[in-house]
Image (tube, grey):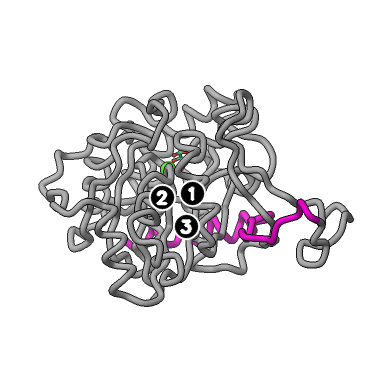
Amino acid sequence: MTKVIIDCDPGHDDALAILLAGQHLDILGITTVAGNQTSDKVTANALKIVELMDRTDIPVFRGAQVPLLRKAIHAGHIHGETGLDGPDFPTPVKEVEDRHAVDFIVQTLMAEDDVWLAPVGPLTNVALAIRQRPEIVSRMAGISLMGGSLTTGNSTATAEFNIWFDAEAARIVYDSGAPIKMCGLNLTQQANATDREIERIRNQGNRVGEVVVQLLEFYLDAGERVTGVRKAALHDPCAVAALIQPDLLEFEAMHVSVETRGELTYGMTVCDYRHLRGFGSSQVDRGPLRQEANVEVAMKIDESGFLDLLIDALGRY
Ligand code: RIB
Ligand code: CA
């Protein structure tokens, strides 16, 4: 079974990513990073989720509480005051581990082979881990992340939240040489939950499903407020599905790096896909300014197959 560390900022879609991974991957640990909400809140939420899935054997580690340089700007308008609004979760009994998330990431990657990182929040922890122990880049199986976009942003016209929250950290990760699979908004906005999916999950009639129904009803309300349409992109589970059933997604190799100085483009993932537009190949055209492809960017997803995979996983709890 594929070994993974999920680095997250739960977050409604983070919760779904963890639940999906819980049925198909060997979760070595969950690390939390400030993002959707404060470190305290996202860490409490991670504990709530492992208790919900009856997997208190999975250790939870608190990570970075603030971005590397800029001020934290959370997303309470989407995920609510708790960061996981909707259901009434009991106060978690399970406690967070003493070890810092970055130390857990470094020590696990140095000790174990073939471990994937699945960051589905800001990349602060991953950047700190790479800075602390650069060798992890060659030791890891890879990074399957939710973040960035080939096209438009959500936090701004150009930047997606996970990257925008800490663009300096993201720059370190994208420029590190780590093998990256990127599920950006161009991909995740193809994978949406609607009331139809809520009904499918409700009809499975299990306890976890009922809590997910309440999560999704809150999340769809937020989606409707933002877009005017009652649907919500299931961003984070896409990065997990890429590890479970890669043939649900189509990827293209290209160079990607992160803008950290732009007044209007701070946090933009600048994706060089000129070769997809007939302007030379990503491997052959090595003009003086061209750079080698460093990221597999997800371009398409089989939405129906993805939703079936997720809903089936939710029904197995
Ligand atoms: O832009 C979507 C990302 O931001 C998701 O990871 C969501 O959980 C939020 O963190
Ligand atoms: Ca997230």
Helix, strand or loop under label 2: helix
- Of tags 3 and 1, the one toward the viewer is 1
Mark 3 Cα shell of 10 Å, populated few (<14), some (14-19), many (≥20): many
Along the line of sight, which residue is nearer the eye, 291 or 150?
Answer: 291
Mark 3: amino acid: Leu
Disc 1 to disc 2: CB gap under 8 Å:
yes
Of label 3 and label 1, which has the lower sequence position? 1
Dot 1 corresponds to which residue? 172
Q: Is mark 3 within 8 Å of ligand 1?
A: no
Mark 2: amino acid: Ala
Residue occupying image coordinates x 59% and y 27%: 156
Residue occupying image coordinates x 46% and y 43%: 198
Q: Which residues are magenta?
A: 288-317
Dot 3 corresponds to which residue? 310
Give percent across and percent down for residue 171.
Answer: 52, 45
Along the line of sight, which residue is nearer the eye, 267 or 229?
Answer: 267
Q: Is residue 12 left or right of residue 91?
A: right
Of label 2 and label 3, which has the lower sequence position? 2
